[in-house]
Image (tube, rainbow, N blue to C red):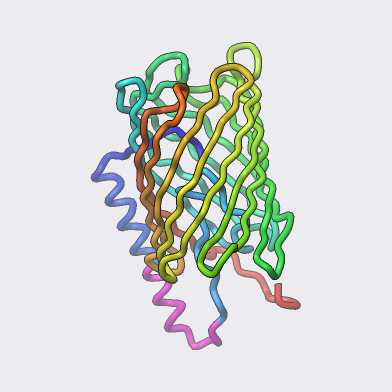
Amino acid sequence: MTLRCKRANAVWSLGWVLAGCTLLSAQDQAGASSSQPTISQPTINTDRPAITDSSVVVPRGYLLFENGFAETGNQGQSGFDFPETLVRLGITAKTELRFGAPDYFQNFNNGRGFGSGWGDLSLGLKQQLVTTAAGFDASLVVTLSFPTGANILSSHGYDPTLQLPLSRPIYKNWTAAGMFSVAWPTDGATRNVTGQASFLIDRQLTGRWDTFVEYGGYFPQRGGPVHLLHSGMSIKITRNQQIDFHFGAGLSSSAVDHFIGFGYSFQFQPFHHERRDGS
């Protein structure tokens, strides 16, 4: 998850959400009316809205769209960013492909001044490393961004990132999670190697509603550290749809003042495969 903050045109976003809801509601109804034996369907599990990514991959054959909008206050300026779209496709039981669509930034500060325009796109892969009966999960995310954005917003380089998200239940409806990352963003003629660490506590309030609080830290090779306090909630309105709300504040001089956002995510299964040996 990036810390760039999001916003969308109200009419466009409402139409987009309604279209997604209609599509998925029709799919759910069609599945419910099928005369074939019922097969347990996976529940949506998104990376957003936390800084810490999910420690599991998208199920094989499923396509997951994560989308969001937010506002950020930084140095007395207010900036926006949308649609924060991440597309995730499960290609095996332990591997997913990822496409980060370019965001549109309005009045965004990237360290070289405030500007507006489209950001860079990214491609990636997520590999499940560990999953245990006790609930401990870990995965590795490899991402490469491409310099496709506006001149004032693009890094103008091909920037790799490695992420290691982890999670484990700790007590009844409580879960602890964290993520360690290293990024190599282009900064002028060199790279500004940046480490990242986050820690999250999640509380499932009901079967569909959970809330979290987390700390996120970014430690660049050049420049001051960024410390953030972040909280939010997500509600699964159906097995295949989720809405979320989150907000956070900077705890260091190099961090943004605040950020607040919301999102809508959905998944469906466009690719079916024969089940063999429980796969």
Single out the residue that lies furthest toward the front.
171
Residue drawn at the location 39% of the way across and 76% of the way down: 29
Horizontal side of 32 relative to 261 (left or right) equals: right
Single out the residue that lies furthest toward the top.
189
Residue drawn at the location 31% of the way across and 22% of the way down: 77
- Percent across and percent down for residue 268 are 49, 63
- Percent across and percent down for residue 128 are 70, 55
Placement of the C terminus among the 4 image quadrants: bottom right
Horizontal side of 262 relative to 266 (left or right) equals: left
In this rendering, is residue 28 above or below 113?
Answer: below
In this rendering, is residue 208 above or below 17?
Answer: below
- Percent across and percent down for residue 197 are 60, 38
Give the camera-side residue of 18 and 248: 248
Residue drawn at the location 67% of the way across and 58% of the way down: 137
Is 26 magenta? The answer is: yes
- Percent across and percent down for residue 16 are 33, 51
In this rendering, is residue 26 above or below 201?
Answer: below
Location of residue 117 by image quarter: top left
Give the camera-side residue of 82 and 20: 82
Total count of labels: 0
Residue range of the region highlighted in magenta in the rendering:
25-38
Residue drawn at the location 67% of the way across and 41% of the way down: 142
Is 186 magenta? The answer is: no
